[in-house]
Image (cartoon, rainbow, N blue to C red):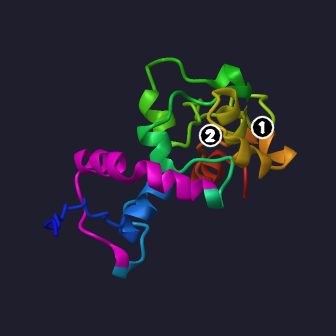
């Protein structure tokens, strides 16, 4: 009888809850206290994404069809989403590649509302972005409703309530 040979299989390491929280939202402190791991430097996050990102994204898609987690935008995203309304507010003073990677694909927009500007700018939805780039699978697309392809309004304007009081705009 031939001798049996055992091959060592690479051990599939489960992604800890703290990492799941981080890759979902980008908040490394957002996990419940008991699930927090050690705070690591930014250089350690990308290798962990490279190791688990594909599996994590597949699980994400099963629950949140038509969108991608923060980690996908940060480490895998191809470009910023298109601005549908308010294109004049796109901040072009410097290359802001890092901005859209930190904000789910939303490009850097002016943070001060121009005089007379009414409403908010809008960007293409994540589903539209994924469809445009051929990243939306047939099963994922079938799980989506038409409203998933509607543009998303974003509020980039940063105005503190205290500043408005000082200006006399609100009592």
Q: Position of residue 65 (x, y in %)?
A: 68, 52
Q: In the rendered image of this protein, does residue 41 appear above or below residue 135?
A: below
Quarter of the rendering occupied by the N terminus: bottom left
Instruction: Find the residue positioned furthest to the bottom.
Output: 34
Give the secondary structure at mark 1. loop
Q: Is residue 49 magenta?
A: yes
Residue 130, numbered circle: none
User: Label 1: few (<14), some or many (≥20) within 10 Å?
Assistant: some
Instruction: Name the one closer to the observer, 31 or 91.
Output: 31
Give the secondary structure at mark 2. loop
Q: Which residue is mark 1?
A: 151
Is residue 102 something one can see in this rendering? no
User: Label 2: few (<14), some or many (≥20) within 10 Å?
Assistant: some
Instruction: Find the residue positioned furthest to the front.
Output: 1
The segment highlighted magenta reads 35-61
Q: CA distance from mark 2 to mark 1?
A: 15 Å
Please identify the quarter of the rendering in which residue 123 is found: top right
> Mark 2 or 1 closer to N-term?
1
Q: Which residue is mark 2?
A: 156
Q: Are marks 2 and 1 in contact (CB under 8 Å)?
A: no
Q: Which tag is nearer the camera, tag 2 or tag 1?
A: 1
Q: In the rendered image of this protein, does residue 85 appear above or below residue 9?
A: above
Q: Using residue 3 as the reference point, say whether residue 143 is left or right of it.
A: right
Tag count = 2
Q: Is residue 122 magenta?
A: no
Magenta segment main secondary structure: helix
Instruction: Find the residue positioned furthest to the left.
Output: 3
Residue found 51% across the figure and 29% down from its top: 78
Q: In the rendered image of this protein, does residue 141 appear above or below residue 65?
A: above
Q: Position of residue 22 (x, y in %)?
A: 41, 59
Instruction: Name the one closer to the observer, 71 or 156.
Output: 71
Residue found 16% across the figure and 63% down from its top: 5
């Amino acid at each position: 009888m031939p001798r049996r040979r055992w091959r060592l299989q690479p051990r599939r390491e489960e992604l800890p809850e703290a990492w799941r929280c981080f890759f979902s939202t980008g908040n490394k402190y957002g996990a419940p206290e008991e699930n927090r791991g050690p705070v690591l430097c930014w250089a350690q996050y990308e290798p962990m994404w490279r190791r688990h990102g594909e599996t994590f994204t597949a699980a994400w898609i099963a629950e949140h069809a038509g969108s991608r987690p923060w980690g996908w935008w940060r480490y895998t995203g191809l470009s910023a989403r298109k601005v549908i309304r308010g294109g004049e507010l796109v901040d072009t003073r410097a290359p802001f590649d890092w901005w859209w990677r930190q904000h789910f694909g939303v490009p850097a927009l002016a943070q001060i509302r121009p005089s007379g500007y009414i409403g908010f700018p809008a960007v293409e939805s994540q589903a539209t972005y994924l469809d445009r780039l051929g990243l939306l699978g047939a099963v994922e697309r079938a799980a989506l409703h038409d409203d998933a392809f509607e543009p998303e309004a974003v509020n980039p304007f940063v105005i503190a309530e205290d500043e408005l009081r000082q200006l006399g705009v609100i009592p």
